Amino acid sequence: MEKFDLTVLGGGPGGYVAAIRAAQLGKKVALVEKKLPLGGTCLNVGCIPSKVLLESSDLYHKAEKEFSKHGITVTGASMSIEQLMARKNKVVKELTDGIMILVKKGNIHLMSGFGRIKAKGLVEVTGDGGIETVESQNILIAVGSEPVELPFLPFDGEKIVNSTDALSFDKVPGSMIVIGAGAIGLELGSVWKRLGSKVTFVEILPRVAPFADSQASKMLERALIAQGLEFKLETKVVSGEKTDSGVVLTVQDKSAGESKLEAEKVLVAVGRRPATRKQGLEEVGIQLDEKGRIKVDENFETTVPSVYAIGDCVEGAMLAHKASEEGVACVEKMAGLSSHVNYNAIPNVVYTEPELAQVGITDEEAKAKGVAVKTGKSYFKGNGRAKSLMAEDGFVKVVADAETDKLLGLHIVGPRASEMIHEGALCIEFEGTAEDMGIMCHAHPTLSESLKEAALAVHKKAIHG
Ligand code: NAI
């Protein structure tokens, strides 16, 4: 039996990145994936296809609702769902093909099939061609996560759908209820609303994107309501029933009591859970926590020596880039390098319009931790570039340590927030201060000038504030 240095289970952004980095470090690597092409949820049915749909639907929405404000007349604009989906599939294919090439280039032994750890150093791969066993010094588990199902609303792929289904509708549903106003719900709800669906959110908590800064979340909610999205906050789904034309949900509002909601489709986006069930992990001694996540130490090593785990199946944010960072750090540590992941500097983005992006902590979180902070804010309505882009909704908020001035958090709601957030990540990574961000020259006119203004506002030195 051929022996490897490392076997990676799972070819998503955690696993394939770890495999490539290990190969760069001279390791002999086997990569096991149950569902090719490589790329996992992110590339195949997550981050990437959703971004394609968001971009195209945004252009369509702008052509219909905003071009006239620029003096552009568009008559008879229409959207071909077939072409939209074809472009989405093309983008996904080009990227996943690219990863297959990288894996080949790294001389990584790709195995197609379901990998199961049999014992320390031994993985059994069940594929179309039968069962094969692979032996390696180390094993890295990067099996990701899966959508959470509500027990009384099982997915049927037609009327009660998950995020994967909602990326591939063949026509615009007349109406859609989205359960959960988190990242997935807000992004996919926005797509189908822009294309013509009536979209209503049911969210159990009092705000949208509950993980975000509360003012940012409020600002985003207002902007989305202005686009025609409806929100039923502090509302719980109690039961659901399929009808000939769709689904009827019984919901319980905190103040108004029980009522019925009906729609053609229901998208359940109430979170994801680690894909650690039916993997046989516990049988070999790998311990899980109460949420089903694999327990790991500071080296990402599980309770079984030489078996490691990273990404959505361990503790922390379920984000592709967090998984990739962990994958790299994990294999570098295996190779004796001193790598680490700075969890304070991991950005989180919701790609709505306006976008919401954050890195570090909110002032509410700082308060809860007993850390005194100062904040500074700048609104895009005072930003020349935002005005010319006709994208004035939103603001930037800087959170700095009151004593040391170190940047602790950056929160942006606004145009292309996803691209600007990295200035905050960089500042946190290099332990920079609000003053550093404020004295740095920012090109004019740019959206990024609002970051400088917000940083200056921490010390009441904003010029336009
Ligand atoms: P999420 O945890 O972000 O949001 C789920 C929402 O559902 C929460 O607001 C929660 O309060 C609500 N909820 C939970 N149970 C409910 C119920 N029974 N009734 C009504 N509301 C309920 O989860 P989501 O959006 O499904 O995303 C899963 C993971 O994928 C997250 O960790 C997210 O960060 C990640 N993701 C990241 C994206 C990005 O970075 N742009 C895009 C998509 C997903």
Image (tube, rainbow, N blue to C red):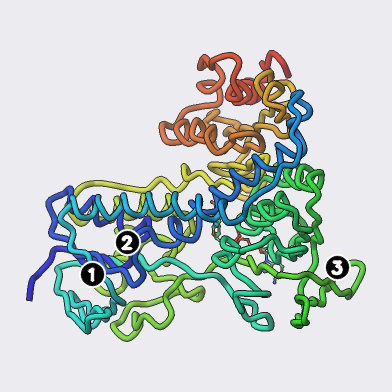
Q: Is residue 122 left or right of residue 322?
A: left
Please give the name of the residue rendered at 13% of the width and 56% of the height, measured from the top-left corner.
27
199 left or right of 147 in image? right
The residue singled out by tag 2 in the image is 300
Residue furthest to the bottom: 283
Q: Quadrant of the C terminus?
A: top right
Indicate left or right for 27 with 289 as reference.
left
Q: Quadrant holding ligand 1? A: bottom right
**Disc 1 secondary structure class:** strand
Which residue does the numbered mark 1 point to in the structure image? 111
Q: Nearer the viewer, residue 183 or 62?
A: 62
The answer to the question of whether label 1 and label 2 lie on touching residues, with beta carbons closer than 8 A, is no
For label 3, the residue is 254
Check residue 140 in the rendering and tell me which mark sits there, or answer none.
none
Mark 3 falls on what kind of element? loop
Helix, strand or loop at label 2? It is loop
Distance of mark 2 from mark 3, alpha carbons? 42 Å
Q: Closest to the observer: 183 or 87? A: 87
Tell me, yes or no, if residue 270 can be seen here. Answer: yes
- The residue positioned 65% from the left and 59% from the top of the image is 185
What is the x, y in percent for residue 446? 59, 20
**Residue 46 position within the rendered picture, expressed as x and y whole percent measured from the top left:** 50, 58
